[in-house]
């Protein structure tokens, strides 16, 4: 099986799991398992809650746009709509992606956006017992750590990323005071 076939198969399994997560009745998350998308960004291992995203797809063609927003890669088509695509590595403080993305995560409700990244590690289900509060040296947009086997993964807070993007493009209010320290500006953005 080629790497393209494996990636396509993995994406199909994730789509099916994503659909199942929304067809089941709401669960008591303290005892039930919660689904996560597992990914690598820059030098970090991450997880994103499936309930915080709208979709997952193989990367599509990105139409570049001139912009002062450093993490904006351009626009891509999703389900008949053009959606802005942002570099997840840049938003997490890793610096630019460094090549074309292989995957997109679609998120946001009223104003959807896509987060682009290169390495998809799979899908896993974990209970709340596998989550820990983040340590002080964790990266931007991370408030929890997921214990996954013998390793840990930083859990990305998608709402924090959406608020940061909206603030950068002038679509939303500045983030709440609790988020201001980690979302006021990206590490690449110059001080004013």
Image (tube, helix red, strand yellow):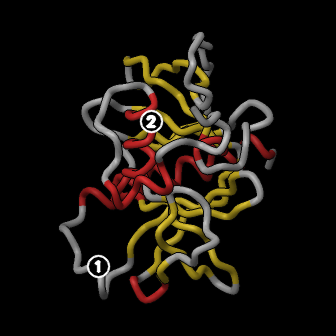
Q: Quadrant of residue 22?
A: bottom left
Q: Which of the 4 image quadrants contains residue 147?
A: bottom right
Q: Secondary structure at mark 2?
A: helix
Quadrant of image for the C terminus: top right
Q: Indicate whether 55 appears above or below 155.
A: above
Name the one closer to the observer, 124 or 98: 98
**The image quarter in which residue 29 lies:** bottom left
Foreground residue among 186 and 119: 186
Image spot of residue 146 (x, y percent): 54, 76
Give left or right: position of 10 versus 156: right
Say what secondary structure mark 1 lies in: loop
Q: CA distance from mark 2 to mark 1?
A: 29 Å
Q: Which residue is mark 2?
A: 165
Residue ID for mark 1: 29
The furthest residue to the left: 25
Mark 2–mark 1 CB contact (< 8 Å): no
Q: Residue furthest front?
A: 192
């Amino acid at each position: 099986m080629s790497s393209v076939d494996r990636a396509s198969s993995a994406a199909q399994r994730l789509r099916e799991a994503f659909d199942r997560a929304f067809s089941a009745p709401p669960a008591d998350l303290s005892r039930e398992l919660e689904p996560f998308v597992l990914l690598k960004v820059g030098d970090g291992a991450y997880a994103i809650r499936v309930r915080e995203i709208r979709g997952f797809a193989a990367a599509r063609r990105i139409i570049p746009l001139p912009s002062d927003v450093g993490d904006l890669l351009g626009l891509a088509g999703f389900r008949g709509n053009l959606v802005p695509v942002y570099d997840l590595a840049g938003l997490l403080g890793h610096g630019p992606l460094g090549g074309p993305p292989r995957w997109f995560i679609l998120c946001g409700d009223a104003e959807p956006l896509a987060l682009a990244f290169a390495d998809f590690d799979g899908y896993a289900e974990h209970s709340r017992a596998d989550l820990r509060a983040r340590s002080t040296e964790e990266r931007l947009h991370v408030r929890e750590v997921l214990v996954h086997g013998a390793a840990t993964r930083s859990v990305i807070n998608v709402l924090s990323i959406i608020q940061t993007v909206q603030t950068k493009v002038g679509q939303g209010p500045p983030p709440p005071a609790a988020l201001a320290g980690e979302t006021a500006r990206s590490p690449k953005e110059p001080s004013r």
